[in-house]
Amino acid sequence: MLVEPPRLVHSRVAVNPVNRTFALPHALMLDGGGLLEDAVLAYETYGSLDETRSNAILVCHALTGDQYLASPHPVTGKPGWWTRMVGPGRPIDTDRYFVICANVIGSCMGSTGPASLAPDGRAYGARFPVITIRDMVRALVGLLEGLGIARLHAVVGGSMGGMQALSLAANWPERAARVLVIASTSRHSAQNIAFHELGRQAIMADPHWNGGDYYTGKPPAAGLAVARMAAHITYLSESALTAKFGRNLQDRPDGSKGAKSFAFEADFQVESYLRHQGSGFTRRFDANSYLYITRAMDYFDLAEEHGGHLAAAFGGTAARFCLVSFDSDWLYPTAESRHLVHALNAAGAAVSFVELSAPFGHDSFLLDVPALDRVARGFIG
């Protein structure tokens, strides 16, 4: 059920979002075999839903993202994470489309996750069930049903958001007419899993993690910061790090320029940058949510879900697909997108593909790449 009844928004809502919460009317069935009772999705909408309810676009967020794709984040105060892509006159034009973005199940920005209260009145913590990308999408489908949207004009996602878009297309093929997948993959490589495990172990090694039961005490901020630092390295390219920081030394607190401490301070600018990223992250994200969402990403394998054949995941689909990769992305390199394109071709799907040149690495889909704007605008129509 809708906790707040849906209403149409007619203002230029890129700066005036509608905050809503949706309670799933039924227990959410999970791939792990359990049920999640009384699950809630926090979401935002931008633009107006037309009378035929046919102009809706679902944007799926990445691992540490949230529903605030085109409006200020309530914790950090920073602009939405995709304001350059979503808004009036932007490639995903809120003057034409009704854009929906929901915080995934398992996260920590209002949707049910490890920090939520369990039926016994205590935070779930590590008692929260392990979830999958398909579980996240099941919840999103429930939201669409609650909004009365039978078929999306498009589903769009980058990184983990792309996984959700692919899962929707594979498991609910009637739900979207267009599928735009950016810098994503059909499954995690051993290297991807290894980086995630490094982050999880950093969190669990923090003495404040306390087996996941830390909500009445001090959170495992140090472990979460290290996890974020390690992950952030994978989002960037070597050329981007070199261009921005090189081996430049950090100015010292005493005002000395470029001096080595001959200790374990943040001597290099890149060290200071990573520490800043880690520290800032702990103020807006829950450590347990990081554990659960990274596990869901590691479990994601569309071919495994469909008898070991990736093409079988898209058999009979009527949706149009567009896949985008970046030449500097070593986390989900272009080969991953080509693998998906070949499977879609084998399934007889309508698919287009482009590798874009950008210096920023995996994070290119969030940054200023005008060619991506043109591709998105052209595909979404």
Image: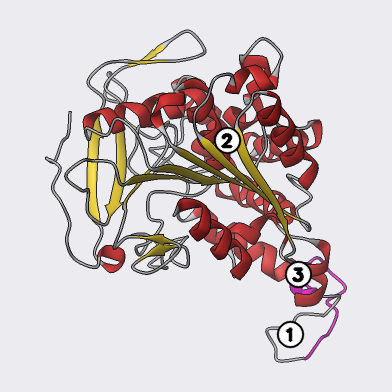
> Can you say which quadrant of the picture contains the C terminus?
bottom left
Viewer can see residue 245:
no
Q: CA distance from mark 3 to mark 2?
A: 30 Å
Residue 271, relative to residue 354: is it above or below? below
In the image, taking residue 119 as reference, residue 32 lies left or right, namely right
Please state if 247 lies on the left or on the right of 4 as rendered.
right
Residue occupied by mark 2: 163
> At label 1, which amino acid type do we have?
Asp
The quadrant in which residue 46 appears is bottom left
Residue 111 location (% of width, % of height): 34, 37
Residue in front for this viewpoint, 304 or 289: 304
Give the quarter of the image for residue 341: top right
| Local secondary structure at mark 2 | helix
Q: Residue at x 30, y 58 (%)?
A: 96
Q: Circle 3: is it few (<14), some (14-19), or many (20+) Cα within 10 Å?
A: some
Q: Who's the residue at 84% across and 75% down the image?
A: 246
The residue beneath circle 1 is 251
**Image location (x, y in percent) of residue 333:** 77, 46
Q: What label does residue 270 carry, if any?
A: 3
Residue 7: say if magenta: no
Mark 1 / mark 2, whichever is N-terminal: 2
* Residue type for callout 3: Val
Residue 328 lies left or right of residue 314; in this view the side is right
Rendered-image quadrant of the N terminus:
top left
* Numbered tag placed on residue 25 in the rendering: none
Label 1 and label 3: CA atoms lie apart by: 12 Å
Callout 2: few (<14), some (14-19), or many (20+) C-alpha neighbours within 10 Å? many
Read off the magenta span.
257-269
Taking the spot 26% from the left edge, 22% from the top edge, the residue there is 38
Q: Quadrant of residue 206?
A: top right
